[in-house]
Image (cartoon, rainbow, N blue to C red):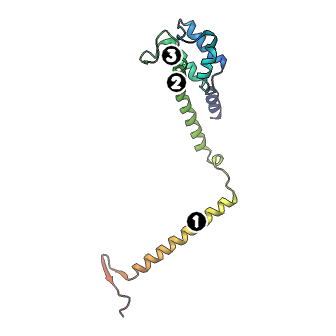
């Protein structure tokens, strides 16, 4: 399980310059054109800024889907054109969400299977404060039960359903 978590964590690592260039090159090789308005000299810095922190696995999946035309229904994506940097980043984040969910699920399974390792050691001060509060609760609860018992002490149960009232003054 830890190997799977490590592999998923590595897949969710932010895309570096090489992954961004590989993605842009693959889309250009597939015949897609660069978006208008971005100077070729500023291409990498602009995409690097937009894709900062975006998982490499999401960028890879988006690149494959763009080349196959899987985003035809998306109004922000023009077929045959490489998406603008913010659109590409949003698509990559959305595609990485499934990998993030899988990683979270694996971590929860690991935590459930190893409950002792997930417990944190409490300081003696915190333990004593909890014990004090627990003693207070027990004392208050016992006092409340005693008060209820005294209030109900005037009644005595006789038989199955018959209740007899006994006055405390009468004898």
Q: Given this view, does label 1 or label 2 mark the residue nearer the observer?
A: 2
The picture places residue 31, in percent across and down from the top left corner, at 53, 5
> Residue 133, image x and y in percent?
58, 65
What percent of the width, then of the height, locates residue 5? Answer: 62, 33
Q: Secondary structure at mark 3?
A: helix
- 159 or 61: nearer the eye? 61
Residue mark closest to the camera, 3 vs 2? 2
- Tell me the quarter of the picture where residue 30 sits: top right
Disc 1: which residue: 134
Q: Horizontal placement of 99 versus 7: left or right?
A: left
Of all residues, the one furthest to the left in this rendering is 162
- Residue drawn 37% across and 91% down? 169
Q: Give the residue displayed 35% in from the left and 92% down from the top.
A: 170
CA–CA distance in space, label 1 to label 2: 50 Å
Circles 1 and 2, Cβ within 8 Å, touching? The answer is no
In this view, which residue lies farthest toward the bottom?
171
Q: Is residue 130 left or right of residue 152?
A: right
Point 69% across, 60% down: residue = 124
Q: Which mark is residue 44?
A: none
What separation in Å lies between label 3 and label 2 (alpha carbons)? 14 Å
Q: Which mark is residue 65?
A: 3
Which residue was labeled with disc 2?
A: 90
- Tell me if mark 3 has few (under 14), some (14-19) or many (20+) residues whose alpha carbon lies within 10 angstroms of its own: few
N-term mark: 3 or 2: 3
Query: Foreground: 148 or 35?
Result: 35
Q: Is residue 170 above or below residue 156?
A: below
């Amino acid at each position: 399980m830890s190997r799977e978590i490590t592999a998923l964590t590595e897949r969710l690592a932010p895309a570096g310059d090489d992954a961004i260039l590989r993605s842009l090159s693959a889309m250009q090789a597939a015949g897609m054109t660069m978006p208008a308005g971005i100077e070729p000299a500023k291409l990498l810095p602009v995409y690097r800024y937009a894709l900062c922190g975006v998982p490499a696995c999401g960028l890879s999946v988006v690149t494959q889907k763009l080349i196959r035309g899987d985003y035809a229904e998306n109004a922000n994506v023009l077929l045959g054109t490489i998406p603008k940097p913010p659109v590409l980043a949003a698509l990559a984040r959305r595609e990485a969400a499934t990998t993030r969910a899988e990683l979270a699920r694996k971590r929860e399974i690991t935590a459930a299977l190893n409950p002792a390792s997930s417990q944190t050691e409490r300081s003696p001060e915190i333990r004593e404060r909890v014990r004090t509060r627990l003693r207070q609760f027990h004392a208050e609860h016992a006092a409340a039960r005693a008060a209820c018992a005294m209030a109900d002490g005037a009644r005595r149960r006789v038989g199955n359903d018959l209740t007899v009232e006994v006055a405390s003054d009468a004898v």
